[in-house]
Image: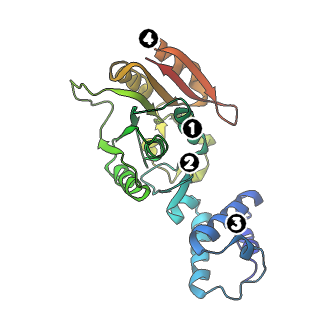
Amino acid sequence: MESLFTYIRQQLDTQYSVTEIKSLVSIICSDSLNISTIELYTGKYTDLSADKAQKIQDIVERLLRHEPIQYIIGTTIFCHLMFKVTPDVLIPRPETEELVNLIVHESKGKVSILDIGTGSGCIAISLNKRLTEASVTGWDISKEALKIATYNNNSIKTNVNFKEQDIFNLPPHTSEQFDIIVSNPPYVTQKEKEEMQPEVLYHEPSIALFVEDNDPLRYYRQIAEYASQALTTNGKLYFEINQHFGKETAEILQRKHFKEIRILKDFYQNDRIVAAIR
């Protein structure tokens, strides 16, 4: 076979940029084929087995159907940890790492944390790994997502308590209290679908992504209502948000009498996090 990079570039150049292809080749080599970066750029692969050649071809065909590379290889890195991902869960984003980093920076000691809409468990597990004295709970409505989160919890050797729970169908009476509540809920509006890449639109779970145009902040209102009761005094609430609704999300928290409300930008300089104190 020719240089692996040359082969994959020729196959994918109509759908992916050179930068994207370089990244894809690196992931394929390191995570799927156990080929080092040095080997990647040494030219011909005289020792590439027929099985590996077939595996490369299969991966390329799936990429041409816009399947995310993370689902193809079944894993992704988030906060320096290896997470299993399937189409039942969103692929964790770098922006969400910023949310985790903020919480870690602003927390210490034996805090209790709730992650609402945990998906793969990436937020909850990363917080549990780095805040070693914290007790962490993760909620999700999806049984399949919770299976993935539980697998990640076991493989990363953390101790998150995962629970099937719908934020819109809470028990009428609960005395459970948390020092921190965090959520990255669905926030992409239907009209924003036109701007989305096919890898996201056709492969990632819609239930974890989209909200109706006529009520894009329904999750934030519901979570803020719950947090206004379930957070301890001076407890902290953290949201990842749609960049177009920072002000509106902050106004929801103002109406619920939260204080020290902040709208924070991500590394792309888009409004991405809203943080507040009960």
Q: CA distance from mark 4 to mark 1?
A: 26 Å
Give x and y (percent) for residue 263: 59, 22
Q: Which residue is mark 3?
A: 12
What is the crowding at mark 3: few (fewer than 14 residues within 10 Å), some, or many (at least 20)?
some
Q: Which residue is mark 1?
A: 101
Q: Earlier in the sequence, mark 1 or mark 3?
A: 3
Give x and y (percent) for residue 72: 53, 64
What is the crowding at mark 4: few (fewer than 14 residues within 10 Å), some, or many (at least 20)?
some
Q: Is residue 53 above or below residue 259?
A: below
What numbered label is drawn on residue 79? 2
Amino acid type indicated by mark 1: Asn
Q: CA distance from mark 2 to mark 4?
A: 32 Å
What is the crowding at mark 2: few (fewer than 14 residues within 10 Å), some, or many (at least 20)?
many
What numbered label is drawn on residue 269? none
Q: Is residue 262 above or below residue 12?
A: above
Nearer-the-camera pick, 44 or 152: 152
Looking at the figure, which quarter contains the C terminus? top left
Q: Earlier in the sequence, mark 4 or mark 1?
A: 1
Amino acid type indicated by mark 2: Cys
